[in-house]
């Protein structure tokens, strides 16, 4: 086993999961701190309206999925026509079109917020 392989394995199997767990821990810690500060001010947490998360929006996921699918389709279509020879291009197009789908969702959501 080469040293580069060993370093890669340590990073993937050791450091990455620890980093993810630390991020989750600090997010939870911040939520608990926010709740305790609200309780100290005398605000009833249960009567507060819940924040709507953008990640729960079916429109966002639909536009994102359509963008990714369109990107893959266009990439494989261009490879089939022998216009492009790079096999990584469909993944690149999928990321670009997925980002375009999220951008469209942002503008639709922004318009709805103004009404």
Image (tube, rainbow, N blue to C red):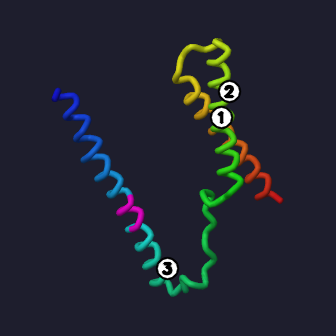
- Cα–Cα span, label 3 and label 1: 41 Å
Cβ atoms under marks 1 and 2 closer than 8 Å:
yes
How packed mark 2 is, by other alpha carbons closer than 10 Å (few <14, some 14-19, many 20 or more), is some
How packed mark 3 is, by other alpha carbons closer than 10 Å (few <14, some 14-19, many 20 or more), is few
Residue 41 counted in the magenta span:
no
Which residue is label 1 attached to? 97
N-terminal-most mark, 2 or 3? 3
Q: Residue at x 56, y 28 (%)?
A: 92
Which residue is label 2 attached to? 74
- Cα–Cα span, label 1 and label 2: 10 Å
Give the foreground label among 3 and 1. Answer: 1
Q: Residue at x 56, y 84 (%)?
A: 46
Which residue is label 3 attached to? 38
In the picture, measured across the screen, residue 20 lies left or right of residue 3, that is right
Write the start and end of the magenta stretch as one range: 24-28
Give the foreground label among 1 and 2. Answer: 2
Q: Residue at x 16, y 29 (%)?
A: 1
In the picture, measured across the screen, residue 100 lies left or right of residue 39, that is right
What kind of element bears circle 2?
A: helix
Q: Residue at x 61, y 69 (%)?
A: 51
Q: Which residue is the extreme one toward the right?
A: 115
N-terminal-most mark, 3 or 1? 3
* Residue 11 found in image quarter: top left
């Amino acid at each position: 086993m080469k040293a580069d392989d060993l370093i890669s394995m340590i990073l993937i199997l050791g450091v990455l999961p620890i980093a993810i767990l630390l991020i989750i821990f600090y997010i939870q810690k911040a939520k608990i701190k926010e709740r305790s500060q609200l309780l100290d001010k005398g605000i009833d947490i249960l009567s507060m309206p819940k924040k709507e998360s953008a990640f729960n929006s079916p429109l966002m996921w639909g536009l994102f999925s359509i963008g990714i699918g369109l990107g893959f389709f266009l990439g494989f279509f261009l490879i089939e026509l022998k216009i492009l020879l790079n096999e990584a291009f469909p993944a690149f197009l999928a990321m670009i079109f997925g980002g375009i789908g999220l951008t469209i969702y942002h503008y639709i959501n922004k318009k709805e917020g103004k009404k």
